Image (cartoon, rainbow, N blue to C red):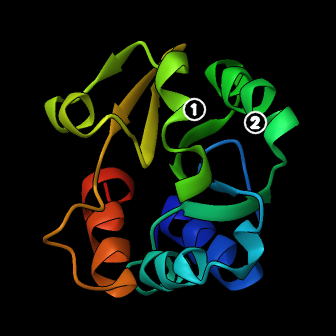
Amino acid sequence: MSENKQAVETMNADNVISKETKLFGLIGEKAGTNRLFAMINRLVKADKVDAMIIPMNIREDDFYFTVQNMKKSQVTGAYIENEYQELVLELLESKDEIVEVYGKCDFVLRQGEELHGYLLEKNDINSKEELAQIIFEEFIKD
């Protein structure tokens, strides 16, 4: 077994974050109560990907500071809860077409020191499980 594969298995088993771990956040006032992060982490562990999503309970007065600082952090991206999906727009360097149409963003991806916004939770998503699968497939899985 390669050293990298072994490290991934250890990370998944022990929930250890290394410099190589793709780190994601789930940002909301009560993010810890949203089970989406647990669903995504189960997919990560099952596929042995060196990644983790962490709930971040963020108050509105800390929201801008938190998201702005993602640009220089180890955080690769974040799911944005409903209460901040309109506020995040002014912090994005680019937005996909659907974000422009709906005027809200539920996923932010950091590329270099720029934040790019996406709207994943549209009318055609029927469950949190389906949303977790989309986030995993589109942004986390190698």
Residue 14 location (% of width, % of height): 76, 80
Label 2, residues with CA under 10 Å away: few <14, some 14-19, many ≥20 = some
**In the image, is 28 to the left or to the right of 1?**
right
Q: Is residue 78 visible?
A: yes
Circle number at residue 75: none
Q: Are marks 2 and 1 in contact (CB under 8 Å)?
A: yes
Q: Amino acid at mark 2?
A: Phe
Residue 106 location (% of width, % of height): 43, 49
Image quadrant for the C terminus? bottom left
- In this view of the protein, which residue sits in the foreground, 24 or 80? 80
Residue on which disc 2 sits: 63
Q: Secondary structure beneath disc 2? A: helix
Residue on which disc 1 sits: 87
Give the residue drawn at x 52%, y 59%.
Answer: 4
| Dot placed on the residue nearer the N-terminal end, 2 or 1 | 2
**In the image, is 74 to the left or to the right of 136?**
right
- In this view of the protein, which residue sits in the foreground, 52 or 10? 52
- In this view of the protein, which residue sits in the foreground, 43 or 17? 43
